[in-house]
Amino acid sequence: MNCEDAREGVSAQLDGALPAGEREALESHVAGCAACRAFRVELADVRTLLRGVDDLDEPVSRAAAVGKGVLARIEEDPGRKREKWMVFVGIGVVAACAMIVAGIAWHYRPREESEHGPAPVLREPSPAFHGHLELRAADAATRDALRELFRQWRGTSSLSQPEAGPEFAFAADFDGPDDPAFLERLRAFQRDHGLSIRSWKFSSSTR
Amino acid sequence: MSPLPPGNETVPLDWASQPDEDHMRRVQAGDTRALEYLIHRWTPRLSAFFYRLTGDPHASDDLLQESFLRLWASRDAFRADARFSPWIHAIARNLATDRARSRDRKPLHRAVTSSGAPGQSTTLLGRIADSATTPFAAASKLEMLARLDEALRSVPETFREAVVLCDLQRLSYEDAGEVLGVPAKTVSSRLARGREHLRQALAAFRSGPIS
Ligand SMILES: [Zn+2]
């Protein structure tokens, strides 16, 4: 092994990336070469210096600004608008088909069902919103009040309420039209019941 | 109790403990919240990366946005077995390279002055962690950083990329190889050459105070 090979080996060795088969040759070269011994010490210093650089504490506001800029440009992307537009057309077509099917069903409805009125057509033509909420409350009344609040949700929802333990838990997955008023009611609920709420986990997405 | 923020854009608490790849799969499903989350997670690291590749602290805001837009545009190309870090670094590096080319082969690095007053200096490298004890520690941090900036700029680009990816961005040889499109063995030898350049450039500094 010559000095050039040895120096490459030293660099890899510092990263623990020296192939096992090369270790012996490297050590025997370094043992007999004062220059490479000194090199190893100096290179280790350089590596330590580099790896001590720590400038990752960017202000959060910067990431927020970048994120805002990116999302704005994604929103204005004509391809994406077309996608959305096509989704609406798609929903419209589905709704129209459903109404036709419902109309046919209504026309050919079994006699005994006549008093129940026409078959329901699509209740939510544009399910745009999905929300997920998990509550852990200190008392049953708070949990029950939240469950009650979900009666006002105009979309579909799946609610779950495990058996009461030391805390009263409640979870809801809900889909439907984007409804800022309902979300405002959730916020108000959280504010008003702050003292009885042990944890509140909320997430949502809009399509 | 944290209130619902305005705009109703909280994310589940357990996202913080999930790997980038999980969030990337959400992005693939069209979830822009996950994209925003990745932007928050990666802005500091990518910004440091651009800073060092371009030497221009003002270039990187724009490059950052562009990187995440490319990520979004090519989200379908992220394979099920891919790892996120080399992938986003490759996007970022390609952008920086394109940018440098479109500027008519102007040298990638601008001169960065290190003559600012202490505390105001805009050195290429940001800060050295307080815990770092190096033979350079006797010098003031600012001097040390200024010299490191300078030394790094003197390293030929091919070798500097390896140093930036492995020593500063902390990628493995394999991941850096994926970013650069070369085998890990090549990364190892480029990194060795880059460190050797730095060693020489820093030698004067190491043995005595800078003039
Ligand atoms: Zn030697």
Image (cartoon, coloured by chain):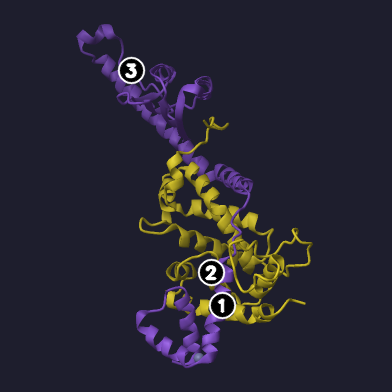
Chain colours: A purple, B yellow
| Circle number at residue B66 | none
Q: Which residue is drawn at 73% across and 67% down?
A: B112
Task: Please check whether the numbered discs 1 and 3 fall on a single chain.
Answer: no
| Count of numbered marks | 3
- Mark 2 and mark 1: Cα distance apart in space: 9 Å
Q: Which three-letter amino acid code belongs to the residue tagged 3?
A: Pro
Q: Nearer the viewer, residue A72 or B140?
A: B140
- Which residue position holds label 1? B195
Query: Could you tell me which secondary element the residue under label 1 belongs to?
Result: helix
Q: Which residue is drawn at 50% across and 59% down?
A: B88
| Circle number at residue A120 | 3
Q: Which of B207 and B61 is in front in this view?
A: B207
User: How far across and down, in percent of the image, does residue A51 sit?
Assistant: 55, 67
Query: Could you tell me which secondary element the residue under label 3 belongs to?
Result: loop
**Snapshot quadrant of residue A99:** top left
Label 1 is found on which chain of the structure? B
